[in-house]
Image (spheres, rainbow, N blue to C red):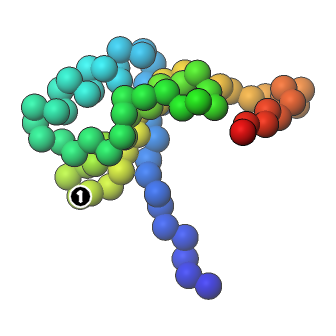
Amino acid sequence: MSAGLLHHLNFIVTDIDDIGRANVRMKPEGVPIVCGPGRPSQSESMFFYFLDPDGMTLEYRFGMEELPETGARPPRMFA
């Protein structure tokens, strides 16, 4: 069995504008943008994936749903 690999690091930002600012600042500097900004169909959150200088995938995310340990909403099914 092989060891697991780290896929990416996720940083939760405090303002939706942080994602837009990151995109605007990184593009002219040539930072490789992996995906985004965008919004997945399964949630209301916003994401922005980019690469650090070592090629590690990093993510800024805003609006993640927090689920309590007890009394969480029922699971949803998607097509």
**Quadrant where the image shows the N terminus:** bottom right
Left or right of residue 44: residue 67? right
Q: Does residue 65 appear anywhere in the picture?
A: yes
Q: Secondary structure at mark 1?
A: loop
**Quadrant where the image shows the C terminus:** top right
Quarter of the rendering containing residue 67: top right
Residue 69, x across and y down, in percent = 82, 34
Instruction: Count neighbours of disc 1 (C-alpha within 10 A) and say few if under 14, some if 14 to 19, many if 20 or more.
Output: few
Residue 46, x across and y down, in percent = 47, 25
Q: Residue at x 44, y 47 (%)?
A: 9
Q: Which residue is mark 1?
A: 54
Residue 24, x across and y down, in percent = 20, 23
- Three-letter amino acid code at disc 1? Asp
Q: Farthest residue in the bottom direction?
A: 1
Q: Does residue 64 appear anywhere in the picture?
A: no
Left or right of residue 54: residue 43? right
